[in-house]
Amino acid sequence: AQSVTQLDSQVPVFEEAPVELRCNYSSSVSVYLFWYVQYPNQGLQLLLKYLSGSTLVKGINGFEAEFNKSQTSFHLRKPSVHISDTAEYFCAVSVAGTASKLTFGTGTRLQVTL
Amino acid sequence: GAVVSQHPSWVICKSGTSVKIECRSLDFQATTMFWYRQFPKQSLMLMATSNEGSKATYEQGVEKDKFLINHASLTLSTLTVTSAHPEDSSFYICSAIPISGHTDTQYFGPGTRLTVL
C-alpha cells in the first residue's frame, strides 16, 4: 500500500515570496506522483505529475516539483507566489504503470497575503 | 482537453429521499471513473471505482447498497445516494481516466455538494 504525508497543514506566505510545499510518500513499488490544486468549492485541477525521466517537473501556473527517490519526496515549489495561488494543494501517488486509484495526502492550505 | 463535468453542482434534499449525481467526461472516453467524498477541510476519500460495463468496486467501509454506482457508457457514471440522511451531507467528486492519451492521470470533476436536511 502507498501513503502520502503532507506535514504542513497550512503555509502562510507573502505575495511575491517563494514557497515550498512538502510531500513525502511511502511505497514498496514504483509510483507516479501528482500535485493537484483545489480552489474553494471546486474540484481538483492537475498542477503537474512525475511519471519517469527527469526528476524536475514543471507544471502550470509557474509551479515545479522535484522527485527525490532517496528521500521519497516530491516537494512543490514556486519562486514567486500570487494572491490567486491561495488554495488547497494535494499531493497524491498511484502505482506506476497502471491506471490505478490515487492515494492523497491530507492537503496543505497555501494562504498568500499582501 | 480532459474536461469532466458533474451535475448537479449542488443539491438539497430531505432525509429519506434518493439523490442521483452524474459524472461525465466531455471530450474523452473513460472506462474507469472514481467517486470520492470530501468532508470540510479534509482530504478526498475514495469511495468506489466505477468500470464501464461491470460492477463498481467499493472501498472498505462504503455501503454498496447505499451508494449505488452505474457506469452505463464510456462517458457517464452515476452515483445514487439512496435513503439519504444528514450524515451523508458532503462534497462528492468524481474523476475519470482517459482510455487513450494520458492514461496515467485522473481528471476531476468540479464536485457536487449534497446537503441532506
Image (cartoon, helix red, strand yellow):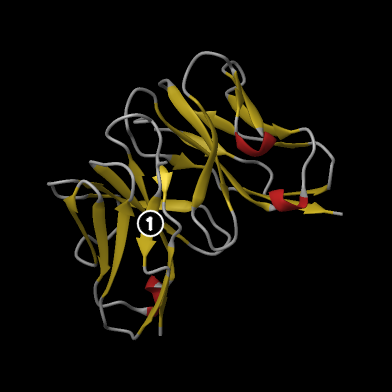
Q: Residue drawn 12% across and 46% down?
A: B53
Of A47 and A5, the residue lying toward us = A47
Looking at the image, the residue that sits furthest to the top is A53
Residue A44 at what x, y percent from top left? 50, 49
The quarter in which the C terminus of chain B is drawn is: bottom left
Looking at the image, the residue that sits furthest to the left is B53
For disc 1, the chain is B
Amino acid on which the number 1 mark rests in the picture: Ser
Would you say B22 lies left or right of A1 here?
left
The total of numbered circles placed on residues is 1
Q: Is residue A58 visible?
A: yes
Residue highlighted by disc 1? B5
Residue A10 at what x, y percent from top left? 71, 51
Q: Residue drawn 31% across and 54% down?
A: B24
SS for tag 1?
A: strand
Q: Residue drawn 34% across and 78% down?
A: B85
Would you say A38 lies left or right of B18 here?
right
Of B102 and B89, the residue lying toward us = B102
